Image: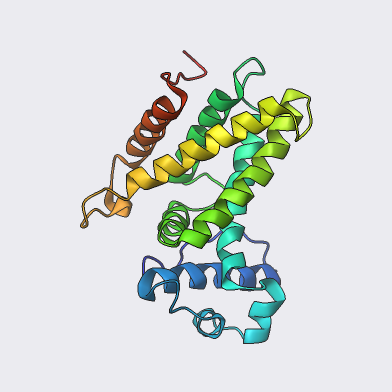
Amino acid sequence: MGISGDLGKRTRIPGDRDDDCRERLVDATLDLCMDQGYDATTADQIAAAADVTPADFERHFATKDAAIMSVVDDLLQATAAALGDVKAEVEPEHAMLIATIELLGAIIDGRGVITRDRMLAMGRVVTSTSHLQQQASAVRKRVLTQALAGRMGSDSQDRRVQRAVTMWSAIAAGAYVGQLHMPSNYDPRQDDWLSERMVANLSETFAEVMGEAPWQEDE
């Protein structure tokens, strides 16, 4: 089925059946949406694919959208945490680029908050559905606004914070759109240069939106 029988599995505490159930539901949601399309996928199908009951699904997620957005939230929370490792004097948009590149590298190398397959599946499902793109944008703005406000010693209504989040949202959206123009037979799971390709795509989109070339923290 789709791209994974073990898509996106995390390290789990032995015996933590509730966490295991939740993870299987996330995997099943992404797998089914990849295989048969978002619109054709139902909560009952997801529960069956995860080998749990519909009540188990409802206990963890209100909708299939919530299951997908949980992955988006995981990624953005990890990005927010990575901002703490970027030098304080770095401008916020550049800081988010650096944090995102670090996050992507960690995931692709197998040391990230989720697996590479789960990240790729989430990206394909979200970019294929307009209202999921809108939801992802809302989650991005919520998480990053809070993180940047803390980093800048300001509040969420600060105009500099709002501008940085708006600019980064445009960069992230543009980078996702760029990935849609790959050849139809392109399989990112088989791409030995995936990390470099994603960094280049982000950097090029950053330059287009910001009107200046990005730079890395160690330069």
Q: Quick check: 180 above or below 4?
A: above
Residue 53, image x, y percentages: 62, 86
Way the structure is coloured: rainbow
Q: Is residue 20 left or right of residue 2?
A: right
Image-based side of 62 in relation to 187, left or right: right
Residue depicted at 27% across the width and 48% down the height: 181
Identified at 60% across, 83% down, the residue is 52
Residue situated in front as seen by the camera: 45 or 5: 45
Q: Within the image, what quadrant is residue 79 found in?
A: top right
Return the residue nearer the eye: 112 or 203: 203
Q: How many marks?
A: 0
Q: Nearer the viewer, residue 61 or 78?
A: 61
- Up/down of 84 relative to 7, above or below: above
Q: State whether residue 74 appears in this view.
A: no
x and y, in percent, of residue 72 in the image: 57, 53
- Tell me if residue 11 comes above or below residue 94 in the rendering: below
Does 51 appear above or below 206?
below
Percent of width and height locating residue 101:
48, 33
Does residue 181 appear anywhere in the picture?
Answer: yes
Question: Where the N terminus falls, by quadrant?
Answer: bottom left
Q: Residue 76 location in percent, x, y? A: 60, 45
Does residue 188 appear to the left or right of 40 in the view shown? left
Q: Residue at x 78, y 27 (%)?
A: 154
Q: Nearer the viewer, residue 186 or 16?
A: 186
